[in-house]
């Protein structure tokens, strides 16, 4: 990129290097406040904000692994690391050059298009690439749209600067075309599914962030299948979200705002499906009967790149008035596993980069600057994700003079959108979720500088009757370490059934928006030292460096004291854990695992995962229950004979303690040290017990291995 703006100029993230968690020493974590009661005294604790601090919803544990905590409604911060090219699991490729072209006098549209078509006719290699068209330095005047219609084709210049001697400049001189570069084969809709492949999801509640659920019958499905997951916009769901929160406009219509996820099946166990990336909204069967269907990818193109180009759109007259010119610089439509990098786009009316029905795309080191249009509605959305855009990563991008610099216009079919270290300069309005329930947006290290606006820089909030019933524009979205001027607002409001977050942000962070609603989760405003500095980098670093093997429980049961001391509760589909001063009401859960074959010398991390819930009665004074995990040396017990009277003894100190709160969700405890010591001693049977502290009113309920509608206890072992 040219040097007219230094994208690395930011207070908190420096040059944006990746975060390393190995050997991390974690400071004290405060786990009190609104979400959870303190374990010992019940008094609220606060995060220690010294040289560094961590948030309650997501933080590192003692081993350097990320721990996620749900609130009383089951809301939690999801894993955003699946955004980008191939879910962030592959670097952007360097595709070999197959054709070189130079500028010709006059219109170069056909010059460029012929080269693209030639490469598009070549066979794909083993990685799905056909080749690159290299545009040598110079100015390429074009009057039409340049189309990339075939998978595996890359359009590459030699630089995105203004100097034509050393850079590749595409200059669009045609009035009123939609896009200068269009990456698209067809306009096929995702809803065009393979006939007779619809299958209902029958897990009662698939919480935000989950990847596993149960279907009616998985016999027709296979690992690798491309599926669409649909949450219909039912009357029950509309009522739960207050009709969309449209203020003075009519509520959203029945079936008009479906939530849709484009996913691949990663694993199948019986009728349980694991998908390649999480869902970004609760799939609550009481509100909407969700289902999936297979999609054949008809019309989809993949492995396409646009690189090292400058797209300069000609205009006449005032840049705040002229609209007779190309409206978008680069449009992606029906694409997957593709990228745009090192490009500068100027003088568009709507967007420098715009995506529709795009999945797993990376936009890196790009600038969408100096748009040309009247400054009013539906214009100047510089980086713009539209309908069915999912798992899109924007990194180190700059927008100037935007109305909405980094924005989702995609309704409820857009999700998993990450803006990493992106900067808006001279902006007029907010970067934001713009309308109708976009989910899972992350503004990580976002910066707003030199704004021209009315005091609002970034927001996840209710837009009410704006734009014709935009309503709740974003849900389960996060502003993390964002920096805006002190007189600029970051507006964070809580939607019904969901949550939004602003953690460690700088500026005026507020829950006061244009329509009155509860504030979202706001913590650590103007406090330096948030860890991790980048949520996305911490998440992707952990996922890339960790390869867990899942070991299911082989025996599980709970025991109860008092008059129940000699009753065996093995074989139940639920495990109950409860604290009480009286034995009659105490319940402990016992778990046994077999880790035969695990190499103790290669062991890095072991985590106990449990699907559990705890709903405190209203006004009980206890928000959440602390669940402790203990080592049990005696592994001779069996689930069909264990009782309170014959239960094995617990080791004296708890291995780990975590709060459980809200509806059914996954919780994890670190048991690495105990497992390592047992394996080093040659013992592969691992026995654990779970007890509860601080819950005097209601038990914690957890899925046992006999729970047909869930996943039982597991040990996640990283011994790679």
Image (tube, rainbow, N blue to C red):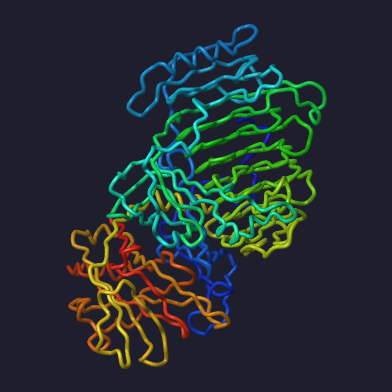
532 is higher (above) or lower (below) than 301: below
Q: Is residue 169 above or below residue 22?
A: above
Q: How many numbered marks does the figure carry?
A: 0
Residue 45 in view, yes or no? yes
Task: Residue 584: give x, y in percent of width and height.
Answer: 36, 91
- Which residue does the image show at 71% across and 46% down from the upper left? 468
Name the image quarter holding the N terminus.
Answer: top right
Choose top left, top right, bottom left or bottom right for residue 670. bottom left
Q: Residue at x 25, y 86 (%)?
A: 567
Expressed as whole percent of the image width and height from the top left, the position of residue 587 reads 35, 83
Question: Residue 435 in the image: x percent, y percent?
Answer: 65, 47
Going by the picture, which residue comes out furthest to the top? 105
Left or right: residue 162 versus residue 81 is right
User: Quick check: 194 left or right of 623?
Assistant: left
Residue 529 in view here: no
Residue plotted at (71% across, 30% down): 349
Residue 502 x %, y %: 62, 59
| Left or right: where 552 falls relative to 653 | left
Q: Is residue 2 above or below residue 279?
A: above
């Amino acid at each position: 990129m040219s040097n007219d703006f230094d994208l690395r100029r930011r207070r908190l993230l420096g040059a944006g290097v990746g975060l390393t968690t190995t050997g991390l020493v974690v400071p004290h974590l405060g786990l009190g406040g609104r979400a959870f009661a303190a374990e010992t005294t019940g008094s609220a604790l606060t995060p220690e904000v010294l040289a560094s601090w961590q948030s309650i919803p997501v933080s590192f544990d003692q081993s350097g692994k990320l721990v996620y905590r749900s609130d009383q409604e089951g809301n939690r911060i999801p894993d955003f690391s699946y955004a980008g090219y191939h879910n962030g699991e592959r670097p952007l490729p360097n595709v070999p050059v197959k054709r070189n072209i130079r500028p010709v006098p006059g219109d170069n549209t056909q010059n460029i298009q012929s080269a693209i078509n030639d490469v598009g006719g070549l066979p794909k290699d083993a990685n799905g690439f056909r080749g690159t068209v290299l545009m040598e330095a110079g100015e390429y005047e074009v009057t039409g749209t340049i189309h990339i219609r075939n998978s595996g084709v890359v359009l590459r210049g030699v630089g995105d600067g203004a100097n034509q001697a050393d850079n590749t400049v595409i200059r669009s001189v045609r009035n009123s075309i939609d896009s200068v570069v269009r990456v698209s084969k067809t306009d096929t809709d995702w809803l065009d599914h393979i006939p007779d492949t619809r299958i209902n999801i029958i897990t009662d509640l698939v919480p935000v962030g989950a990847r596993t659920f149960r279907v009616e019958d998985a016999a027709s499905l296979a690992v690798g299948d491309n599926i669409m997951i649909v949450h219909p916009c039912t009357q029950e769901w509309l009522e739960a979200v207050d009709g969309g929160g449209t203020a003075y406009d009519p509520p959203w219509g029945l079936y008009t705002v479906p939530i849709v996820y484009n996913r691949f099946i990663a694993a199948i166990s019986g009728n349980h499906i694991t998908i390649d990336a999480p869902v970004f909204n609760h799939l609550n069967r009481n509100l909407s009967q969700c289902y999936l269907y297979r999609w054949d990818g008809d019309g989809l193109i993949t492995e396409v790149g646009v690189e090292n180009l400058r797209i300069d759109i000609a205009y006449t007259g005032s840049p705040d008035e002229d609209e007779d010119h190309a409206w978008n610089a680069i449009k992606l439509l029906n694409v997957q596993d593709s990228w745009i990098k090192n490009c500068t786009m100027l003088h568009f009316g709507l967007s420098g980069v715009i995506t529709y029905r795009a999945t797993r795309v990376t936009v890196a080191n790009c600038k969408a600057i100096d748009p040309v249009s009247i400054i009013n509605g539906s214009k100047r959305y510089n980086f713009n994700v539209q309908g069915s855009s999912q798992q899109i990563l924007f990194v180190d991008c700059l927008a100037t003079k935007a109305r909405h610099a980094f924005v989702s216009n995609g309704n409820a079919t857009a999700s998993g959108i990450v803006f990493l270290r992106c900067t808006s300069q001279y902006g007029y309005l907010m970067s934001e979720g713009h309308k109708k329930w976009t989910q899972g947006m992350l503004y990580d290290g976002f910066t707003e500088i030199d704004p021209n606006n009315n005091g609002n820089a970034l927001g996840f909030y209710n837009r009410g009757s704006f734009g014709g019933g935009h309503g709740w524009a974003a849900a389960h979205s996060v502003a993390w370490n964002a920096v805006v001027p002190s007189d600029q607002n970051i507006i964070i409001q809580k939607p019904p059934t969901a949550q939004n977050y602003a953690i460690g942000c700088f500026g005026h962070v507020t829950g006061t928006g244009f329509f009155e609603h509860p504030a979202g989760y706001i913590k650590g405003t103007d406090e330096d030292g948030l860890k991790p500095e980048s949520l996305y980098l911490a998440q992707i670093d952990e996922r890339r460096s960790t390869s867990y093997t899942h070991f299911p429980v082989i025996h599980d049961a709970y025991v109860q004291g008092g008059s129940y001391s000699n009753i065996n509760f093995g074989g139940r589909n639920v495990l109950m854990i409860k604290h009480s001063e009286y034995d009659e009401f105490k319940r402990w859960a016992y778990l046994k695992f077999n880790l035969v074959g695990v190499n103790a010398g290669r062991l890095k991390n072991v985590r106990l995962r449990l699907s559990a819930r705890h709903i405190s009665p209203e006004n009980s004074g206890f928000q959440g229950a602390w669940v402790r995990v203990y080592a049990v040396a005696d592994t001779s017990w069996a689930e069909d004979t264990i009782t309170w009277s014959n239960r094995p003894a617990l080791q004296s100190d708890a291995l780990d303690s975590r709060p459980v709160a809200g509806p059914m969700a996954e919780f994890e405890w670190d048991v690495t040290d105990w497992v390592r010591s047992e394996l080093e001693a040659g013992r592969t049977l691992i026995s654990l017990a779970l007890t509860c502290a601080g819950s005097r009113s209601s038990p914690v309920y957890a899925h046992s291995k006999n729970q047909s509608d869930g996943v039982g206890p597991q040990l996640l072992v990283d011994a790679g």
